[in-house]
């Protein structure tokens, strides 16, 4: 006889009753038998479904564990073992503080979660600024931590694998020489360019308004972001990019020029006591060269203080591994602590503008230190790019491969992002070197002809002259605000003896850049505009797509206004700059300190602050405004200085005219 079979399981759904904990006689073997019997009672389909679900859940658990571990490693950029050495990590917070909701912080504007539209940027960490009283302790901790890591690393072999901020595993380049902590050569005397006093003679009313804006921005940075890369003015916190006090270094020479002695001395003290480059951190070669190396070099020239040159040389040494590529075209990123250099994770290409816009700084560093390696590495790039095919009447593509040394993504030409400062540095290197390097100016002149032939058009109905883009023979009426550096560069070239029609083009493009600001409801330009090409209808000349409405406090319009005013004396350029400063004050100034980039230049009632003050607002935008409002042509004379692409003045080599 067979025992009575158990009731047939219901086959429409799966029902598993766990009998654990409802022990019949307390015996484990009973529980095992009971589970096993129930399992056997299930149909094959039910068993398969359960097994599939269990496997799926286990896989999900495994994948999310690996993901979290990777993210943690990428964010921290170091192993668990290293973390033992650096116990005092700052907290990473997910969202801005509630204090943003106070409308007084931004009149007429409700704070919004900032969108991210950065180029060449790593993810930012949202880190709460500590209270003022804990400031010194925190800085001391940071310094001790960095020095502990630095010392430990120097003792052990620093040539080892690191993880970049993008999460890529990176091996140091074979043969990479790590920079020593001591400067290799004693600093040479400063330039022959006239030194300017850090006492503004007697600033006029508009200059005083710039000083006020700077002080306000600086107050926010000092209070909420001191020693960190960027201020997040709405949340009263800060973000890190390289973790090197980017805003402070970018702003040094601006403080000197504006006559802010107290602020300059305090910042100088931070550079002396806290700024350390022995850090396991990836920096972007271009961005760190123009902002940090350029900032330190110009601070050295203006103040004559050797501290800045020593720091510049240390930093320059740490960037050198980026040039160790098969083609001599540098990688985009380099770890300044380990010397590991690498391209972005997704490509072995570098950006053309990035590899060709570091030369002013590297050449000057060689001149000052007597160490030729900086100049040689940077000029080798210029030579190779010069001899490449794939240009169109002097216009260059946007990417170049670090292995082959050839242009990639051929057939796309722009004066905006990824190509812009290639053109700027052709002219400025020629000026820096005393106008002797003819190949540079020939390439520049050819490129200007290329711009006229392929990229220049006039809009309707106002016939604004603009620079569009070309993609595989198709013209696009798109223009980045970044292109607004061009009127200033053309005017500078004309001032230095290049054809007079460059100045005419500069004036026409300046009008257009002004209209890119003027035609917006806030008076501030969006990041990108499209020009109307067709006369019919009641279209406006300047059109903006929803994704392009943001303004990052960029300098290019006011940069060109400075050159145009300095070189023509036409006061309308000062007036235009004044309007722009007023708009910055109305729509981007945060009452508790600092200025914020905004998401919508077309909505004056709600411009949507993005909670970020880029370092170039202090390094460039306010500096150019101050110089624009000056009527003294000898204040950083364009015959004695050339400004790098981050507005840091470097001396023109040789005795200045009229000095
Ligand atoms: C700055 O870092 C430099 O001016 C660079 O050449 C372009 N982008 C920003 C400002 O917009």
Image: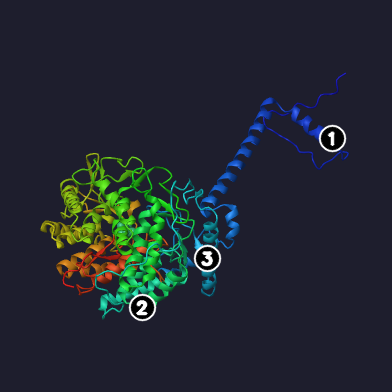
Residue that extends furthest to the top in the rendered view of this protein: 1
Q: Which residue is mark 2?
A: 261
Question: Which residue is drawn at the image coordinates 44% and 71% (left, top)?
Answer: 272
User: Picture coordinates of residue 355 (x, y %)?
Assistant: 32, 51
- Name the residue nearer the viewer: 222 or 461: 222
Number of residues whose C-alpha sits closer than 10 Å to that of mark 2, classed few (under 14), some (14–19) or many (20 or more): some
- Element carrying mark 3: helix
Q: CA distance from mark 3 to mark 2?
A: 26 Å
Q: Quadrant of the C terminus?
A: bottom left
Instruction: State left or right for residue 56 relative to residue 370.
Output: right
Q: CA distance from mark 2 to mark 1?
A: 84 Å
Instruction: State left or right for residue 628 relative to residue 343.
Output: left
Residue that extends furthest to the left in the rendered view of this protein: 500
Q: Which residue is mark 3?
A: 142
Numbered label attached to residue 58: none
Q: Quadrant of the N terminus?
A: top right
Asked if the residue under mark 2 is in contact with the one under mark 3, i.e. CB atoms within 8 Å, the reply is: no
- Element carrying mark 1: helix
- Name the residue nearer the viewer: 275 or 594: 275
Q: CA distance from mark 1 to mark 3?
A: 59 Å
Asked if the residue under mark 3 is in contact with the one under mark 1, i.e. CB atoms within 8 Å, the reply is: no
Q: Which residue is mark 1?
A: 29
- Element carrying mark 2: helix
Instruction: Name the quadrant containing residue 277.
Output: bottom left
């Amino acid at each position: 006889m067979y025992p009575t079979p158990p009731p047939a399981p219901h086959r429409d759904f799966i029902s598993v009753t766990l009998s654990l904990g409802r022990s019949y006689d307390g015996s484990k073997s009973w529980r095992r038998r009971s589970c096993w019997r129930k399992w056997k009672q299930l149909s094959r389909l039910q068993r398969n479904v359960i097994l599939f679900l269990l496997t799926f859940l286990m896989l999900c658990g495994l994948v999310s564990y690996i993901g979290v571990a990777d993210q943690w490693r990428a964010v921290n950029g170091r192993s668990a073992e290293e973390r033992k050495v650096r116990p005092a990590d700052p907290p990473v917070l997910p969202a801005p503080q509630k204090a943003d909701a106070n409308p007084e912080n931004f009149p007429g504007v409700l704070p919004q979660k900032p969108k991210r539209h950065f180029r060449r940027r790593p993810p930012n960490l949202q880190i709460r600024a500590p209270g003022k009283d804990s400031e010194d302790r925190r800085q001391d901790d940071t310094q001790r931590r960095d020095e502990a890591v630095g010392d430990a690393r120097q003792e052990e072999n620093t040539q080892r694998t690191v993880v970049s901020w993008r999460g890529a595993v990176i091996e140091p380049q074979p043969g990479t020489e790590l920079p020593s902590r001591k400067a290799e050569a004693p600093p040479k005397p400063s330039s022959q360019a006239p030194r300017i006093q850090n006492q503004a003679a007697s600033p006029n009313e508009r200059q005083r308004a710039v000083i006020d804006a700077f002080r306000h921005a600086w107050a926010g940075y000092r209070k909420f972001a001191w020693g960190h890369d960027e201020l997040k003015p709405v949340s009263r916190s800060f973000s890190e990019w390289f973790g090197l006090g980017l805003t402070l270094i970018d702003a040094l020479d601006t403080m000197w020029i504006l006559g802010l002695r107290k602020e300059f001395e305090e910042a100088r003290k931070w550079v002396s006591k806290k700024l350390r480059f022995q850090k396991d951190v990836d920096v972007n070669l271009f961005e760190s060269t123009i902002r940090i190396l350029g900032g330190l070099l110009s601070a050295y020239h203006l103040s004559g203080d050797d501290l800045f040159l020593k720091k510049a040389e240390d930093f320059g040494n740490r960037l050198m591994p980026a040039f160790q590529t098969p083609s001599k075209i540098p990688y985009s990123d380099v770890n300044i602590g380990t010397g590991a250099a690498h391209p972005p994770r997704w490509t072995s290409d570098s950006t053309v503008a990035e590899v060709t816009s570091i030369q002013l700084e590297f050449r000057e560093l060689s001149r000052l230190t007597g160490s030729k390696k900086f100049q040689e590495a940077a000029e080798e790039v210029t030579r190779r790019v010069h001899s490449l095919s794939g240009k169109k009447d002097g216009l260059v593509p946007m990417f170049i491969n670090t292995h082959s040394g050839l242009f990639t993504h051929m057939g796309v030409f722009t004066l905006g992002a990824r190509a812009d400062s290639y053109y700027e540095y052709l002219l400025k290197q020629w000026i820096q070197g005393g106008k002797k390097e003819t190949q540079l100016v020939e390439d520049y002149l050819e490129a200007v002809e290329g711009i006229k032939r392929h990229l220049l058009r006039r809009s309707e109905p106002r016939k604004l002259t603009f620079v569009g883009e070309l993609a595989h023979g198709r013209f696009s009426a798109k223009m980045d605000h970044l292109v607004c550096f061009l009127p200033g560069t053309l005017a500078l070239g004309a001032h230095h003896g290049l054809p007079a029609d460059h100045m005419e083009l500069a004036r026409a493009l300046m009008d257009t850049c002004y209209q890119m600001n003027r035609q917006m409801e806030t008076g501030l330009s969006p990041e990108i505009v499209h020009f109307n090409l067709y006369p019919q209808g009641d279209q406006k000349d300047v059109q903006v797509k929803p994704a392009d409405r943001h303004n990052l406090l960029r300098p290019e319009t006011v940069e060109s206004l400075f050159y145009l005013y300095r070189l023509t004396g036409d006061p309308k350029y000062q007036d235009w700059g004044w309007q722009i400063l007023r708009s910055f004050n109305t729509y981007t100034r945060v009452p508790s300190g600092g200025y914020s980039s905004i998401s919508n230049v077309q909505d004056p009632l709600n411009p949507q602050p993005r909670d970020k003050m880029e370092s170039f607002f202090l390094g460039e935008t306010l500096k150019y405004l101050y110089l624009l409002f000056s009527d003294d042509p000898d204040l950083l004379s364009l015959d004695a200085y050339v400004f790098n692409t981050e507005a840091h003045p470097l001396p023109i080599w040789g005795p200045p005219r009229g000095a």
